[in-house]
Image: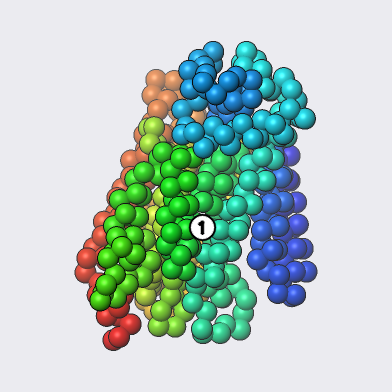
Amino acid sequence: MRIKWVECAALSVMAALSVMTGGGSWFLALALGVTLLKCLLIPTYHSTDFEVHRNWLAITHSLPISQWYYEATSEWTLDYPPFFAWFEYALSHVAKYFDQEMLNVHNLNYSSSRTLLFQRFSVIFTDALFVYAVHECCKCVDGKKACKELTEKPKFILSVLLLWNFGLLIVDHIHFQYNGFLFGLMLLSIARLFQKRHMEGAFLFAVLLHFKHIYLYVAPAYGIYLLRSYCFTANKPEPAASSLFPTLPFQEGPLSCILGSKLLGFVQCFGQSALRHRLLSVGKAGDASIFLILTTTGHYSLFPLLFTAPELPIKILLMLLFTIYSISSLKTLFRKEKPLFNWMETFYLLGLGPLEVFCEFVFPFTSWKLKYPFIPLLLTSVYCAVGITYAWFKLYVSVFTDPPVGKTKKQ
């Protein structure tokens, strides 16, 4: 039944694209299409994060500020920075018009059809910031070399890879989180750096840190870049913003910004959860290869998040569609250069197929299922860790061995 919903989404998207791309509204068509898909995912499985955010709505709505971070009726205590607490507070004043009972702190594990609709739509609605940020990032892509086909334009490819990102779709709109809204702040901040609006970029990143503290791991890169490009620029050429966020594959003509974000996927195995995001300047197909390996492997590592049977065909179908598009579009973009993958990388990526078959269709029927139920997760974690480590190692080699962006342009 849920597969039919996804098929309906695909038909809706095709109809929207056929009507709107002819009039030059392709970005709006892409945004509308993915929004329709998100709406069709509303009745799917949701994780305990759904109850976590419902409890935070109740805490911020019914208790004074002084008690927000001390309320412990539920095990899911409020543990995000203050801005996210205020974000939940604002949402709660809309939630009360859907179902007042969801805002009762003592209604643990409360769920209703109206609660489900509100929480799902709150994620979809706040994704508007992410859509705007993607639009701003696309403005940073150099489009001097005209392409006859819309689907071959770097801006179009980038928009699809960001707006239709598989990782965000399943983590936010099935599993349930607000990563799209947060990554909207991140991408908008990076876009402002590309546009030389450094103060705005720094301000937006500071705001982001007050929403979710996990983004602190990006702070050193921001600090170093701002020192070099804004604070100490006397008699020195200003470095490109892309030199700070090295990897995603867009080249058009001699220069190009390649924007990659959470596209590099989440790594959520054995408690490690991180949405890798980047915005990179690329001049060769090798960087596209790194992006694709990291994206494909990182996305597959998310599969254990959706462990229920009805979601199995959905996650497989959505990942296949996204992966096939990513590889085919970037192969087209770099068709005049060397192949994106060597034989070893091709063999590794194809190995994800047999791994999935074993974990989902073979292992459940073996005698090991009861005694060693963790084996599928272990195999997935180890296999994906190898690919992710390889991709990052390859990226570091590229960063330290390739000539600087400025020198490359002169050559």
Q: Is residue 348 above or below residue 243?
A: above
Residue bearing mark 1: 188
Q: Is residue 52 above or below residue 332?
A: above
Answer left or right for 245 relative to 356.
Answer: left
Tell me the residue at 72%/44% (across/down): 40
Residue 128 visible in the picture: yes
Residue 32 rendering spot, x and y as whole percentages:
71, 57
The C terminus - image quarter: bottom left
Q: Nearer the viewer, residue 309 or 129?
A: 129
Q: Nearer the viewer, residue 218 or 176?
A: 218
Q: Nearer the viewer, residue 369 or 331?
A: 331
Q: Is residue 373 above or below residue 17?
A: above
Tell me the residue at 33%/66% (across/down): 229
Q: Is residue 107 above or below residue 56?
A: above
Residue 296 rendering spot, x and y as whole percentages:
45, 54
Residue 92 rendering spot, x and y as whole percentages:
66, 30
Tell me the residue at 61%/84% (across/down): 148
Residue 41: name its quadrant: top right
Residue 89: name its quadrant: top right
Answer left or right for 155 relative to 246.
Answer: right
The N terminus - image quarter: top right
Answer left or right for 346 relative to 172.
Answer: left
Tell me the residue at 37%/75% (across/down): 283
Name the element at disc 1. helix
Going by the numbered disc 1, the residue's amino acid type is Leu
